[in-house]
Image (cartoon, helix red, strand yellow):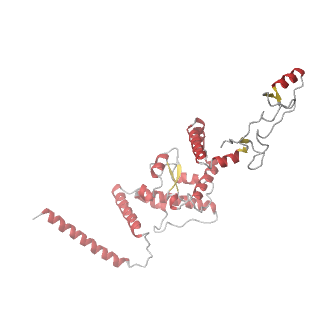
Amino acid sequence: MRNRGQSHRWSLYRDACIDCRTTDRPHAAHGLCTRCFQRRKAAGTLPTERIHRWSPVADACVRCGSADRKHCAIGMCKRCYNQIHFATEHGRQSLRAAWKKYRSSQRGKLRRREWNELPTSSEAGRRRTRMSRDRSHGIACEPIPVGYEQLVLVAFEFRCANCGAQGKLVLDHHVPIQAGRQLLHNAVPLCPSCNRKKGAKRPEDFYSAWKQVEIAVALWEVRSKSDSESAPASTHESTAPGYGLEPRALADRIAVLPDDERAILETLLSRLEEGRQRYGVWNVEDGREYPAETLDEVIDALHYCAAGLVRMRRRAGP
C-alpha cells in the first residue's frame, strides 16, 4: 500500500526555503532553512502564520476529493484507504488479527461483558443484531417486537431450556437458522455451554422427546402472549390442535403423572416422532378408515406375538 513513487519534499509543506529559496541546507522550522531561521530568530522576525495542509502530499483525498475526513495514508482519507486495503488478502488478515487482539484485550473483554449484561431496556440493540443475522441468511423475517426477549425468558422461568441452569442465557434458534426459520416464535434460552453443544442441530437430534414437548408448550405460550400484546382487541381462547385443551394445562396434567406412566408417555411420544420423520405429520382428517386399519394392525401384532413365542420355544428346546 505504500506509494513508492512519492517524491520527497524539502519540508513537510515547502519545496524550498521561503527566504533564500535554497534546498541545499536542511529545513529548520516555519519554512526556513537553518541559516535563515537563526538570522530571523535573532532579529525577532520569525513568521507567525502557520500553513496547515490536509496532508503532506495533497490538499484533499486523491480518491474521493473530500477534505472533511482526516488523512490516513498516501493521500487518501481513512475510508478510502480501508476500502482498498481490506479488499486485499493481506488487509483481511490484518483486520482479523486486529479484531482477535482486541477481543483478547482487557478493554475488549470488558466491552463484551458489558454487552452481555445489558438490561432488558437495552434490548433494542440486540434485537437489531438478531434481525440482521436472520436477513444475512436470506430469511424474509418479520420485525421482532420490543419485549420479546423478556417474554421468552419468563416463559422458560429464566432457565436454560436444556439443563435448567440460571445466569447468563442466550436466545437460540430452536429450529436452526440454516433451515430457514427466523428467531421470532422460534427462540429458546440456552446457557452458553448448551448453545455450543446444540450448534446447528435440529431439535429432535439434541433434545429428548419429553423436553421437546416442554419447549413446544413454552413456545406456544410465548407466541400467544406476543400476539395478544400486538393485537389487544383479539382474544386467544383457542386450544392446541388435537388436544382439546391448552398446552399449559396439558403439561400440568402430565407433570403429576407417576414415573412409570410418564415413561410410557415418553415412549409413545418417541414412537410418534419416529412416525412423523418416516411418514410425515399426523393428520386425523386424511380420509382413512381408522377402525378397519386398526383391526389389521391388531391382527399383525398378534402375528408378531405368536412368532415371538415360537422363537422362544425353539430356543428353549424340547
Work out whether residue 98 or residue 246 is closer to the camera in this orientation and state it. 98
Work out whether residue 287 or residue 137 is closer to the camera in this orientation and state it. 137
The N terminus sits in image quarter: top right
Residue 76 image-quadrant placement: top right
Residue 45 image-quadrant placement: top right
Residue 56 placement (x, y as % from top left): 76, 38
Relative to 18, 260 lies left or right: left
Residue 47 placement (x, y as % from top left): 87, 29
Q: Residue at x 35, y 58 (%)?
A: 263
Relative to 294, 303 lies left or right: left
Work out whether residue 108 or residue 184 is closer to the camera in this orientation and state it. 108
Residue 282 placement (x, y as % from top left): 43, 70
Residue at the farthest top position? 42
Residue at the farthest left position? 318
Residue 28 placement (x, y as % from top left): 79, 27
Relative to 89, 11 lies left or right: right
The C terminus sits in image quarter: bottom left
Instruction: Decide: is 63 above or below 300.
Output: above
Work out whether residue 266 or residue 179 is closer to the camera in this orientation and state it. 179
Instruction: Decide: is 165 above or below 224.
Output: above
Label total for image: 0
Q: Residue at x 34, y 79 (%)?
A: 292
